[in-house]
Amino acid sequence: MKKNSYTFCYIVCWLGLLFSCRLYAEPKLPFTVAKIKPSIVAVGTFMPARNPRAVFLGTGFVVGDGSLIVTNAHVIPSRLDDLHLEQVSAFYRKGDVDKVIATTVVAVDKAHDLAILKISGAALPPLRLGDVASVQEGQLYAFTGFPIGMILGLYPVTHRGIVSAITPSVIPMLPSEQLDVKMLRKLAAPFNVFQLDATAYPGNSGSPLYNPDTGEVVGVINKVFIQEGKEHALSNPSGISYAIPADYVIKLLKDKNLR
C-alpha cells in the first residue's frame, strides 16, 4: 500500500511538472502581436484631388507619448505637391474603419535611415523601445508591417526569424563603379545592423523588430537583399533582411528633445 502511494505521488508530480512545462512553453507571440498591431501604421502621402488619394510608401510604428511615429528616412518623399495639398500621412484601421491622419516630419537621420513623424489629433498606443545590448545572434524576433502595401487593406502582417548576424552596415566587396559619395561616407563610418533570416518586402521598411515575448522594440526594418532587382521583390525575395538598432532611434529622439 505504501509503495502504491509513492507511485501515485510520483505520477501526480510528474504530470504537474509536464503541465507546467507545457504552459511555460506556450508561445507568447500571438498575444504580443495583438498588443503590437494597434501601434502599427502605414506611411505614405495623401492628396485630396489625386486618384488614388492615398499612396503607400512604407510602415511606421508609434513611440513616446503616442504622437510620434518612427519610420525609415527613405520612406519620406523628398518633394510634396503643396499646390494640391499633398501631405505625409499615417494610415491605420480602427475597428472596421480605415483612418488617415496628417503628420509633420520632425526629425530625420539620413546616416541611419531613420525619420520621426508627429501626428495631429488623438494619440495612438506607443511601443516601448527595448535594450539593444541584450540582442544576441540566434535569438528569435518578430516584425509587423505592410509587406505589399495596402493591396490587402490596412491589415498588418507579422513575420518572425532569428538574428542571424550582427554585421557592419556596409558591404565591403563592391565593384568600383558602384562606389559613389554616399557609399564612401558609409564606408568611412560603418555601424552594426541586425541581419535577419526572415523575409521582408519593400513595404516592410520602417516596421518594428521586437521581442516576441515582451513586444519591446530593438530595431527598425531597413532594407532587403533582393535577387534579380526590385521588379522581382514579391516573386523572388532573397530571405535576408536588415534592421537598424533601436538605440539610434533613442538617440534621435533625445537629440531633437522629443522624449
Image (cartoon, rainbow, N blue to C red):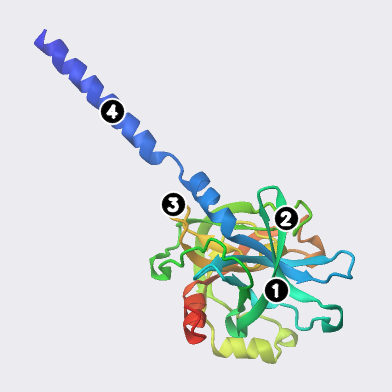
User: Where residue 55 sits in the image (x, y, percent)?
Assistant: 80, 67
Near-viewer residue (259 or 21): 259
Left or right of residue 90, residue 253 in this image = left
Which mark sits nearer the N-terminus, 4 or 3? Answer: 4
For mark 4, what is the residue?
A: 16
Q: Disc 2 residue type? A: Asp
Q: Earlier in the sequence, mark 2 or mark 3?
A: 2
As helix, strand or loop, the secondary structure at mark 4 comes to: helix
State the CA–CA distance, disc 2 to disc 1. 21 Å
For label 3, the crowd category at 10 Å Cα-Cα, with few meaning under 14, some 14 to 19 and many 20 or more, is some
Q: Name which residue type carries label 4.
A: Gly
Amino acid type of disc 1?
Answer: Val
Give the spatial CA distance, label 4 vs label 3. 24 Å
Residue on which the image places disc 2: 98
Where is residue 29? Give x, y as percent. 50, 47
> Which circle, 2 or 3, is nearer the viewer?
2
Upstream in the sequence, badge 1 or badge 4? 4
In this rendering, which labeled residue sits more in front, label 1 or label 4? 1
Residue sitting nearer the eye, 66 or 232: 66
* x then y, percent, for residue 61: 59, 65
Mark 2 or mark 4: name the one nearer the start of the chain: 4
Identity of the residue drawn at 40% across and 68% down:
131
Residue that label 1 marks: 75
Q: Residue furthest left?
A: 2
* Few, some or many residues within 10 Å of mark 2 (<14, 14–19, 20+): few
In the figure, is residue 223 to the left or right of 34? right
Labels 2 and 1 touching (C-beta < 8 A): no
- At 67% from the left edge and 74% from the top edge, which residue is drawn? 103
Residue type, numbered disc 3: Asp
Residue at the disc numbered 3: 213
